[in-house]
Image (cartoon, helix red, strand yellow):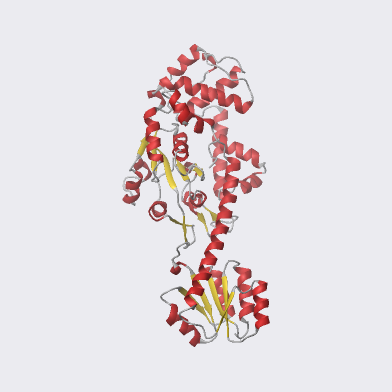
Amino acid sequence: MTEHDWLEYDVVVVDDEEDNLDAFRFAFRKSFRLHYAKSGAEALELVAALEPAVVIADQRMPGMSGIEFLGRVKSLRPECYAILLTAYAELQVLVDAVNSGAVDRYVAKPWDSKEFPSVIRQGIAAFATLRENRELREQLAHYAAYLERAQRDPLDFGALSSEVRLEAPRVGGVSPRLLDAIETIAETAGPVVIEGESGVESELVARAIHIGSPRESRPFVAVMAGAFSGESLERELFGWGAPPFEGAARERAGRCELADGGTLWLHEPNELSPSLQARLLRMLSEGRVERVGETRARRVDVRLIVSVVGGVGRLFGPEPALPELLARLSVFPIRLPPLRTRLEELPLLAEHFLARYAERNERRCARLTEGALMSLSSHSWPGNVRELERVLERAAIVARGQDIQSAHLDFEAPGPGSLGPLGDRLEALERGELARALELHGGNKAEVARALGIHRTTLYYRLKKLGLDS
């Protein structure tokens, strides 16, 4: 049976006689979190504000009977457990009330102070079960929508399988030493920081840790944290209980709830605010999260993986607000070397990217000539693997299915202060507009698509293309 902290749940007691309310105060004030009201109207205001687990109402009250009151409670809070107190043996009335769903249980007066606590605890347990089931359904619905957009990269899985590891000393750009580190940390549940330059294979490593862990069958939730600024990242991760801005949904689960039981990967977040640091530390240390604007803590079991450019200290600035969080994230950092220090892996990586491009576009897989491979090996790769993928995709387009020559390779990138090619400028403009639209609509992509007047499939493609598909 699930263990409950009974004082975490609100219990509303309504009775028009002060002596009866005092009896509850004396008997149960140390066992339950009680709230009192002397009329149905007053109690309905409490129910609307508190979301109580149990409501206890006297049947005979002026203005609104207990049965009528509990019927209205059920309309407002269907999961609430309704207990009716009655000293009158109106059996048919009680049967009708139970059958209608307005009353879950009735207790005859005078109630027994030794037996009543078990009745309240049963009500709390029933409420907790209903709420947990609802939240699980919501989580599954959110995750189903997330999976609709997510695509599994063949490199994420096949390149790291034990069978392939035995066949090649280096696979998919991942060295045996790094694979050993991944296997070691995957068996644990602690947070991981992946350090390296921008463009290294941090997502590959994050997914490999998830796949190699007992959490493999649970969600892997990726958040391109750099696309969110200020409080928007906090809302994205922890959700909200009240609309944070006009047009937002009434309430929304955050990515931490979505990742319950699995892994949450944050890709290159900006410096974490003190508030966000506190929320992350509570999630890691207590397994609890609170939605923005709410005070109720929800239990989650989430493994946190964070990718950073440089060291983990970059997430905190010169003086971390919470050194304990920094210490937790620093236990087992994984450092990814830049591509320029492992150029011997270029042929295997190039083969993978060209094969993936051909599969996605239903084209014949292009091959690199020796001259093209020499050109790739002589480049410094400031953008690492991400730059390699871009260069090869463009080369495959230009080569039109033929072997890729050195002339097909374009390593040019706009420098600081340069306008750059028109396509790059338009892409940057589009990325900025989409990021603002996502923030405005709280990350709800269906709403973003409607607001921009485009099909959702088109939006998902553009978001993925621009690195905003969190």
Where is residue 375? Give x, y as percent.
46, 15
Total number of numbered discs in the rendering = 0
User: Can you see residue 417?
Assistant: no
Q: Is residue 91 left or right of residue 393?
A: right
Residue drawn 39% across and 23% down?
Answer: 342
User: Does 313 sit above or below residue 163?
Assistant: below
Front position in the image: 239 or 414: 239
Residue sitting at x 53%, y 22%: 392
Q: Is residue 132 above or below residue 7?
A: above
Position of residue 183 relative to residue 296, above or below, is above
The foreground one among 78 and 193 is: 78
Residue 335, percent from left and from top: 36, 34
Please provide percent x and percent y for residue 220: 50, 43
The image shows residue 413 at horizontal and vertical percentages of: 49, 26
Residue 305 falls in which quadrant of the image?
A: top left
Residue 339 appearing in the image = yes
The relative height of residue 280 versus residue 333 in the rendered view (above or below) is below
Quick check: 114 left or right of 78?
left
Residue at the (64%, 47%) spot, across then down: 451
Residue 332 falls in image quadrant: top left
